[in-house]
Image (cartoon, rainbow, N blue to C red):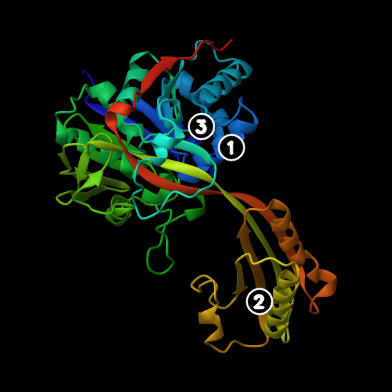
Amino acid sequence: MTAKTVHIGCGAGFAGDRWDAAVPVVATLARRSGPRYLMYETLAERTLALAQQAKIENPAVGYSPYLERILRPVLKSVKTAGIRVVSNFGAANPLGGAHKILEMAREEGISDLKVAVVEGDDLTTVMTEADIRGHAPVEGIAMPEGRLVAANVYLGAQAIADALALGADIVVVGRCADPALALGPLLHEFGWSFDELDRIAAGTMAGHLLECGAQVTGGYFADPGYKDVPDFGHVGFPIAEIDIDGTVVIGKAEDTGGLVSSRTVKEQLLYEMHDPSAYLTPDVTLDISSVRVEEIGTDRVRITGALGKPKPPTLKATISFEGGWLGEGEITYAGPNARRRAELAIDVLKTRVRDLGTNWPLRFDLIGTVATFDGDGGDLRSGREWPDDGEYRVRMATHGGDKKMAQWIADEVLALYCSGPAGGAGVRHRIAPQVTTASILVDRSRVKASARLVEGTGS
């Protein structure tokens, strides 16, 4: 426990985040002293379910398909600078992700890279499907009848700290609570006990502020004329400084755009938080109702006052099922009488799909009206008058269990090129597998998280 301040930067806030975001973060961390970490948060519920499907088709994959794109640009730099990496880009296959990283290390000429995996989030290894289905769903979404694809529980920070104690340069996790990606390093560096509730809460708060990447530095905040963000095209990703007493300072990578202010911090603090006085995580129940947010310099905000309450007795798990197929297509009509041509296209599509003999649900959007806010029935659009001239894009979507039927329905939009109203252009159509998710709460005793180093090093 010699560290006084730990520096943690974020290189990604979701799976498809900018591939080069971590480069200036690593450059900034390399110029600092003390323990330094880089975290990547790349895993959403459906992202994990899709990874599970990919693993079924090919057992060698199932980790984040973006792993190489986002990690390779900084892999050599983090090793050289002694910056340790913690990420959930293991998805459905942390071990496969670890092997991929070691392969990249060999290609980059990096020697002695130690990679650890955290395992134990896959409930299907310790519970039967009947057992899983026997848990009552929470959050109001019932379990469907489709085939079970995945069941993953949100792990806490202890196994990440254990992996770091093994000497890992990079820790690859599957499903864990997002804030645990930061709390794990803090447990390792500071030696905090889980009885120190306020400190565990502060570390969880730091992770919550970092987990969405640029959302705390101006991303998803910018609103021209109301909330302006400088050099937004080069928005920098955040770096947190966490002291042993739980004080958190949020800044960002040097020589980047973006903004860290009391407003960006407050927005991210409240993001996805149903109850600010009782934010449930595997490690602690976080209470931010007494938190103090103070701007202490340019792009530097200090946050103090996080309070911790005992962690909940259960762990949340996401259960994923096959959800059939989405078929959709779009086509644009522009110029004089465009709206009426677009409405005619919708009438043609309704007729053609009805002739296919299916009762699948259909949704028709007329983009350029109120498509974002309208329901499947189009009541908002039909209740108002719209200009005939202009630019309108027709979208049709359907959903069902038959892949061939989904394709046939989507193809009807493509057919509008020559068999629809005048001037249709810009067709896009596709079908895609869907995943349905539900959440359950499982007893902690059913979950056994563990950490281990993966055999194999760089060159």
Mark 3 — residue?
A: 92
The image's mark for residue 113 is none
The image's mark for residue 392 is 2
**In front: mark 2 or mark 3?**
3
Lower sequence index among marks 2 and 3: 3
Task: Answer few, some or many: residues within 10 Å of disc 2's Cα (few below 14, many 20 plus, some between 14 and 19).
Answer: many
Q: Indicate the amino acid at tag 3.
A: Ala
Report x, y in % for residue 229: 41, 58
Q: In the image, what residue occupies the spot 45% across and 30% down?
A: 124
Lower sequence index among marks 2 and 1: 1
Res. 50 visible in picture = yes
Q: Is mark 3 on a helix, strand or loop?
A: loop
Q: How far apart are marks 3 and 1 (CA)?
A: 9 Å
Mark 1 — residue?
A: 53
Return the residue nearer the eye: 67 or 129: 129
Q: Indicate the amino acid at tag 2.
A: Tyr
**In front: mark 3 or mark 1?**
1
Res. 6 visible in picture = no
